[in-house]
Image (cartoon, helix red, strand yellow):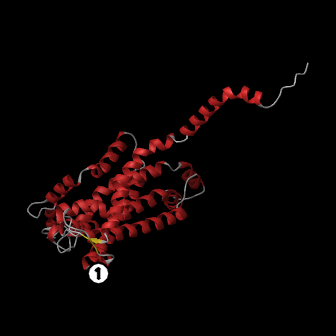
Amino acid sequence: MFVPVAMGAGTREATAPGAPHVLARRRRVRWSSFTPFLYLLPAVALLVVWVYAPLVQTFGLSFVDWNLIPTSPKTFVGFDNYATVLTLPELQQAVGNTVLYILAFMLFSLVLPVVIALLSRGIQGKAKTFYQALIFVPFLITPVATSAVWRWLFDENGGAIPRIAATLGWDLGNVFRDPALVMGAVIVIVGWQLLGFGVLVVSAGLAGISPDYGAAASLDGASARQIVWRITLPLLSPSLVFLALMTILLSAQWTYPIIDILTQGGPGGASTNIYYLLYQFGFRNFDAGLSAAAGVLFFLAFGLVAMLFVEISERLSFHDN
């Protein structure tokens, strides 16, 4: 027997008891969608406190004249600090040295790691682990310990390197006070540390390349050299692009502690770089505005280089899919 059910108030009364459960379920779904962002909150907070806030403060300091004394007033000077920085001969020398450092470190972060990683692919077992540790350990040594060891090696009074050079007829003298040799010494020291990191990244990239490509190419008559140039290196390009970008962006940072400990930018600014120049402006000349203006210019320049480099890398890199 069909019994009609009236629609209206009775229906709302019948469904009303279940409405709180539906609303509670919706609230749980809504809050659960924010859960992943809560995991990111500590990292974002650290970035804001230690990166973004100092960056904003640096932009503000670049427009004032201040000697870092908390009780002294900050005088607004507009773009005068930027105009002064761009005309300083010290800046031109530091930028030129930084470019030379970058070009030289490409040998230690790109060329030599590729050669070493390709030659050592046949090492297996415990020998491979020992070799990897031996290559990577210098990257883990602190700059202070590294500087102490290399200062002893380069010591003109009985150091191992000057002795070896003397047997070959070369008189090195004090390389850290020789304008013609000091930059080469810094490059050797920092490059020795960077080599392990480069080999590690390249070895990881080689491990991700399937050996089937080389095997198929060899069946078609390709030589080992052709396999390396036509298959291995193109597929290794993402790792090489990463190393090149890191070298461009971080060369000044890598060389700063060695310069500060061993050469102090000398002699005559022959070994300085842009980071050490910022330190001199800010904490030796006590000119916070000038140092901040130079820092802003370097930040914009490196940011532009990074953007262009990433865009180019996306176009040129080959990926093994």
Q: Which residue is the extreme one toward the front?
A: 9
Q: Secondary structure at mark 1?
A: loop
How many neighbours does mark 1 have within 10 angstroms: few (below 14), some (14-19), or many (20 or more)?
Answer: few
Residue 188 visible to an observer of this rendering: yes
Residue 207, horizontal then vertical, whole percent: 47, 48
Closest to the observer: 11 or 166? 11
Residue 139 vs 172, above or below: the answer is: above
Instruction: Tell me what residue is drawn at x 19 percent, y 66 percent.
Output: 72
Residue 273 visible to an observer of this rendering: no
Instruction: Tell me what residue is drawn at x 35 percent, y 57 percent.
Output: 53
> Going by the image, does 87 lie left or right of 149?
right
Residue 207 vs 105, above or below: the answer is: above
Residue 320, horizontal then vertical, whole percent: 56, 53
Q: Which residue is the extreme one toward the top?
A: 1
Residue 180, horizontal then vertical, whole percent: 20, 74
> Going by the image, does 12 lie left or right of 3?
left
Which residue in the structure is indicated by mark 1? 87
> Going by the image, does 276 lie left or right of 176?
right
Residue 177, horizontal then vertical, whole percent: 14, 70
Closest to the observer: 138 or 56? 56
Residue 284 vs 218, above or below: the answer is: below
